[in-house]
C-alpha cells in the first residue's frame, strides 16, 4: 500500500497482522541457503560443474567438426586445377593426373570426436544419477526386457530426495504457516457457529466419540455426586461402554455442540500439524492393503479394519452401501434358486456381510 499525489491510499493490503510484530507477517524458506543469496541454491546449480564440462566438450566437438568437416584433397601433380569447385567440377568428372602422381581426398576427421562424445555422455549420466533423473522419471521409453519392478524402484528412488526436501520445507515453512496463521483463522471462523452436524470417518469418530463420552461421564458423575451417590470404577466402565455403544448406533453423523468454548479453551495454541506425507502414493498404498489382507482370515478384526480403511480411501460410506442391501439380497436369492447372475458371488455375500454393511 502507498499514498498517491492526492494523499489517497492505493494498492492492495493482503492481511493485517494485529496480534504480532511485523517480522511475523512474512515467511520465507530458501532451498540450500547460501550467504549473500536470498534464493539459495537451486537444483540446476547442483550440476553446474557437469554442465560446464558438457559445454566444453560440445564446443570442442563443434570446433573439430568445423575443421574436419571440410572436404580437402591432396595431390603432388602441379597440373591439377587449384579448386575443383571453381572450375565447375561435378560428380562424375574425370581428372587427369600425371603418370606416377597422386590425387586423393584428405582424411581430416579428428580421432578425438568419438572420445569427446563418450566423455560428454559420461558427464550427462553422472548428472542424471546426482539428480535421480532416471529414464522412468523422465518419461523415456525403456527397453522391452526391463523388469517392471526395477522401473518401479527407480521411480521411488527418483522421488525420494524430493520427498526429503518437501519434509524439510514442511517443517520449517508449511507447518508454521498452518499452525500460526491458517489454523487460528480457520478455527476462529469455525467458532462463529456453536454447533455442527456432519458426517465423519471412522478414525474421526473414534476421537470425537471419546471426547463426547468423557464429557457425558463427567456430567453424570457430577450429577451423582450432587445426589450423594457413589460411582465405583466398575460403574464408570459400564457407563462408558454403554455410551459408546449408543453412539455407534447413530451411524457416522455427529452433532457437536459448544464449539466456540471448546476451540478457545482446548484447540487454539494446542494443535500440532504433521504436514509431511500429504501426497500419498495410492498405488503403493493399495498394494500394501492387498498384501495385508492376505495375512488375515476374513473373520479377523484386522481384516475388517483394513477392509474399512480401503472403503474409506475409495470414498464408499456405510450409508452408500446400505442403498444396495435390498438389491444384494435379491441377487443372493436368485443365485440360491439356481438362476445365473454373473454380477454377484453368493458364496462371498453372506448374512454376516449384510449385517456388517448396515452396522
Image (cartoon, helix red, strand yellow):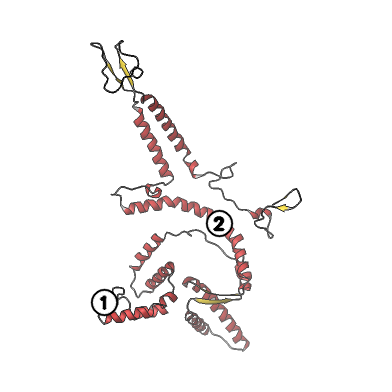
The answer to whether marks 1 and 2 mark residues whose Cβ atoms lie closer than 8 Å is no
In the rendered image, residue 273, in percent from the top left (x then y), is placed at 54, 62
| Residue occupying image coordinates x 36% and y 74% | 300
Q: Nearer the viewer, residue 211 or 80?
A: 80
Of 3 and 215, nearer the camera is: 3
Which residue, given by chain and number where applicable, does mark 1 sit on? 340
Instruction: Answer above or below: position of 178 versus 240.
Output: above
Residue 104, compared with residue 298, is above or below; it is above
Q: Residue 4: give x, y in percent of width and height.
A: 73, 49
- In the rendered image, is residue 269 in sight? no
Q: How many marks?
A: 2
Residue beneath the point at 36% across and 62% down: 287
Left-right relation of 172 to 77: right
Q: Residues within 10 Å of mark 1 (few under 14, many from 20)?
A: few
Which residue does the image show at 39% across and 30% down from the upper left? 61
Dot 1 or dot 2: first in sequence order is 2
Q: Which residue is mark 2?
A: 174
Amino acid at each position: 500500500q502507498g499514498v498517491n499525489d492526492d494523499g489517497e491510499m492505493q494498492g492492495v493490503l493482503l492481511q493485517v497482522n494485529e496480534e504480532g510484530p511485523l517480522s511475523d507477517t512474512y515467511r520465507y524458506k530458501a532451498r540450500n541457503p547460501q550467504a549473500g543469496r536470498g534464493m539459495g541454491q537451486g537444483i540446476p546449480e547442483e550440476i553446474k560443474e557437469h554442465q560446464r564440462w558438457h559445454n566444453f566438450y560440445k564446443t570442442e566437438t563443434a570446433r573439430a567438426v568445423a575443421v574436419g568437416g571440410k572436404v580437402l584433397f591432396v595431390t603432388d601433380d602441379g597440373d591439377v586445377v587449384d579448386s575443383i569447385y571453381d572450375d565447375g567440377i561435378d560428380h562424375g568428372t574425370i581428372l587427369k593426373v600425371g603418370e606416377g602422381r597422386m590425387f586423393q581426398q584428405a582424411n581430416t576427421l579428428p580421432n578425438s570426436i568419438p572420445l569427446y562424445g563418450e566423455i560428454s555422455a559420461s558427464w550427462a549420466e553422472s548428472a542424471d544419477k546426482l539428480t535421480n533423473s532416471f529414464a522412468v522419471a523422465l518419461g523415456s521409453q525403456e527397453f522391452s526386457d526391463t523388469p517392471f519392478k526395477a522401473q518401479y524402484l527407480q521411480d521411488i528412488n527418483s522421488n525420494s530426495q524430493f520427498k526429503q526436501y518437501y519434509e524439510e520445507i514442511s517443517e520449517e515453512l508449511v507447518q508454521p504457516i498452518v499452525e500460526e496463521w491458517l489454523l487460528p483463522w480457520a478455527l476462529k471462523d469455525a467458532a462463529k457457529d456453536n454447533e455442527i452436524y456432519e458426517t465423519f470417518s471412522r478414525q474421526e469418530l473414534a476421537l470425537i466419540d471419546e471426547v463426547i463420552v468423557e464429557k457425558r461421564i463427567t456430567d453424570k458423575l457430577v450429577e451423582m455426586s450432587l445426589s450423594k451417590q457413589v460411582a465405583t470404577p466398575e460403574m464408570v466402565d459400564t457407563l462408558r461402554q454403554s455410551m459408546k455403544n449408543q453412539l455407534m448406533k447413530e451411524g457416522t453423523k455427529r452433532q457437536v455442540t459448544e464449539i466456540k468454548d471448546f476451540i478457545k479453551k482446548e484447540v487454539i495454541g494446542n494443535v500440532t500439524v504433521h504436514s509431511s506425507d500429504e501426497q500419498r502414493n495410492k498405488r503403493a498404498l493399495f498394494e500394501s492393503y492387498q498384501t495385508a489382507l492376505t495375512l488375515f482370515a476374513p473373520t479377523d478384526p484386522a481384516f475388517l479394519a483394513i477392509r474399512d480403511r480401503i472403503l474409506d480411501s475409495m470414498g464408499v460410506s456405510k450409508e452408500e452401501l446400505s442403498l444396495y442391501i435390498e438389491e444384494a439380497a435379491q441377487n443372493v436369492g436368485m443365485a440360491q434358486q439356481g438362476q445365473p447372475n454373473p454380477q454377484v458371488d453368493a458364496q462371498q455375500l453372506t448374512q454376516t456381510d449384510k449385517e456388517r454393511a448396515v452396522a
